[in-house]
Image (tube, rainbow, N blue to C red):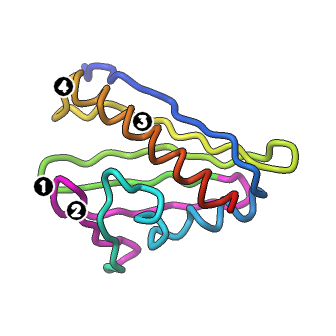
C-alpha cells in the first residue's frame, strides 16, 4: 500500500477577476513572471508539454485547464520525479482566490518540503502583485 504524502494547501486572495487570474495562470509562459524563486524559463514543447528550467535543472510542465470550473491542475516531470499540483481559481467578491494543493514528493525530505512551501509564499505574493497592478 502506498504511503499517504504530506500535503499543504497554499492560497492567496487577489483583487483581480477570476477571468483575468485564470487566463494568466492557464498560460505557462507567464509562470516565470511570478514563480521567481524556482522557475527560470518556460518554452513551448510538444503534445501540450512545456520545457522548463528551474533552479534545480530542466523538466517539463503540462497544464490541464478547465475554465468553467476554474481548474488549473498541472503536472511536472523531470529525471527524478513526476508530480501533480491541484490548482483552482474561484470567485471571491470582485476578486478571486487562488488555491494550490501540493504533495511532498518522495524525493524531498521534510525540511526540503517545508522550505519549498515557504518559497511558495513568496511566489504567491508575487502573483498577487502582478495581477493587482
Q: CA distance from mark 1 to mark 3?
A: 19 Å
**Which quadrant does the C terminus fall into?**
bottom right
Residue 29 in percent (x, y) is at 45, 73
SS category of the residue bearing label 4: loop
Q: Which mark is residue 118?
A: none
**Is residue 117 shown left or right of residue 1?**
right
Magenta span main SS: strand
Residue situated in front as seen by the camera: 109 or 4: 109
Q: Are marks 1 and 3 in contact (CB under 8 Å)?
A: no
Q: Which mark is residue 79?
A: 1
Q: Are marks 1 and 2 in contact (CB under 8 Å)?
A: yes
Q: Which mark is residue 102?
A: 3
Q: CA distance from mark 4 to mark 3?
A: 14 Å
Residue 43 in percent (x, y) is at 33, 78
Q: Give the magenta range.
A: 47-70
**Is residue 54 shown left or right of residue 48?**
left
Q: Which residue is disc 2 drawn over? A: 59
Q: CA distance from mark 2 to mark 4?
A: 20 Å
Among the two numbered marks 4 and 3 on one chain, the one whose residue lies closer to the N terminus? 3
Q: CA distance from mark 1 to mark 2?
A: 7 Å
**Is residue 54 shown left or right of residue 90?**
left
Residue plotted at (80% across, 42% down): 92
- Label 1 CA crowd tier, 10 Å (few <14, some 14–19, many 20+): few
Residue plotted at (86% across, 50% down): 94
Q: Which residue is disc 4 drawn over? A: 109
Residue plotted at (71% across, 65% down): 20
Amino acid at each position: 500500500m502506498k504511503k499517504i504524502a504530506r500535503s499543504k494547501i497554499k492560497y492567496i486572495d487577489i483583487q483581480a477577476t477570476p477571468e483575468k487570474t485564470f487566463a494568466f495562470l492557464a498560460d505557462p509562459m507567464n509562470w516565470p513572471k511570478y514563480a521567481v524563486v524556482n522557475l527560470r524559463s518556460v518554452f513551448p514543447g510538444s503534445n501540450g508539454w512545456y520545457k522548463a528550467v528551474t533552479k534545480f535543472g530542466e523538466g517539463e510542465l503540462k497544464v490541464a485547464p478547465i475554465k468553467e470550473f476554474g481548474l488549473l491542475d498541472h503536472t511536472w516531470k523531470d529525471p527524478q520525479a513526476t508530480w501533480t499540483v491541484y490548482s483552482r481559481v474561484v470567485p471571491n467578491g470582485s476578486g478571486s482566490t487562488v488555491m494550490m494543493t501540493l504533495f511532498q514528493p518522495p524525493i524531498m525530505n521534510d525540511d526540503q518540503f517545508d522550505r519549498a512551501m515557504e518559497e511558495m509564499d513568496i511566489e504567491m505574493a508575487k502573483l498577487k502583485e502582478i495581477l493587482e497592478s
